[in-house]
Image (cartoon, rainbow, N blue to C red):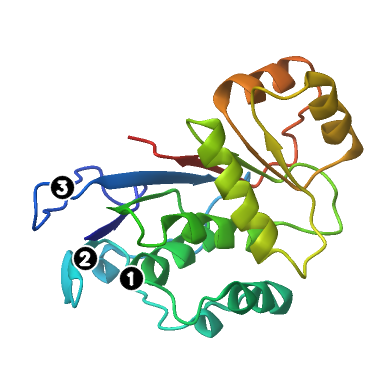
Amino acid sequence: LNSIQNPKRERNFTKPKTKTKNMSTEKVETKTVDTKKEEDAKPSSEMTESEETSAGVVTSNWTKVAESFDDMNLKENLLRGIYGYGFEKPSAIQQRGILPILSGHDTIAQAQSGTGKTATFTISTLQLVDPSKKECQALILAPTRELAGQIQKVCVALADYMKLSIHACVGGTAVRDDIAQLKAGVHVVVGTPGRVYDMINRGALRLGSLKLFALDEAD
């Protein structure tokens, strides 16, 4: 079961149905930071409610489906990292979740564990980051240190050919090391709320160049 919803388009969200009661779902919310007004807002006629897939019913208000990663117009070095990581074809949530983020839409994506949510927002993040600008352009928050570490490792693997600095900012590590790393310049920060908030208050983490904010396990 996968669900992608765009809060800019639709206020009344319906919870997706699951076939079994013991299947857990997780939610990811991304917010694109852009001072420009949207010039190419999509008409409501492009929205759809649901469609059948082999994995179940996918409920979405985004109709554009990318059948392959090549159809997403991603950077060449990012594509190399994606295929090098072992991905061959995007999952259902990746087919529907990456493009709205890249188009500048605030996006909520909900799906069962193991369906590719992490890759959905990490691929989007890496596509939006400018490697030539060594400032924090994307901030990803996770509720636990372990999850933040896993996300950071996925980002590093996918960005293997992009020459990006991706820093894990979590508790249980030396504060001075975080400060030094952030002041040296990073492109993406993956962290837990407590340590990230501390780094912002200390002035070590500056968000003036932020393009994307992702909140994993938003529910």
In the drawing, what numbered circle is on residue 58?
A: 2
| The N terminus lies in quadrant | bottom left
Circle 1 is placed at which residue position? 92
Q: Residues within 10 Å of mark 2 (few under 14, many from 20)?
A: many
In the drawing, what numbered circle is on residue 193?
A: none
Q: Where is residue 127 in the image (x, y as percent from the top left)?
A: 64, 64
For the residues labelled 3 and 1, the Cα–Cα distance comes to: 18 Å
For the residues labelled 3 and 2, the Cα–Cα distance comes to: 12 Å
Q: Are marks 3 and 2 in contact (CB under 8 Å)?
A: no
Q: Position of residue 95 (x, y in %)?
A: 40, 72
| The C terminus lies in quadrant | top left
- Up the image or down, 109 lies above or below 170; here it is below
Mark closer to the observer (3, 1): 1
What residue is at 74 percent from the left and 66 percent from the top?
A: 160
Earlier residue among tags 1 and 2: 2
Q: Does the rendering let one see residue 118?
A: yes
Amino acid type, callout 3:
Thr
Q: Are marks 1 and 2 in contact (CB under 8 Å)?
A: yes
- Left or right: residue 66 compared with residue 2: right
What residue is at 73 percent from the left and 22 percent from the top?
A: 199
Circle 3 is placed at which residue position? 14
Q: Position of residue 119 (x, y in %)?
A: 50, 60
Task: Depth check: give the residue in front, 216 or 106.
Answer: 216
Amino acid type, callout 1:
Ala
Earlier residue among tags 3 and 1: 3
Amino acid type, callout 2:
Val
For the residues labelled 1 and 2, the Cα–Cα distance comes to: 8 Å
Task: Depth check: give the residue in front, 32 or 110.
Answer: 110
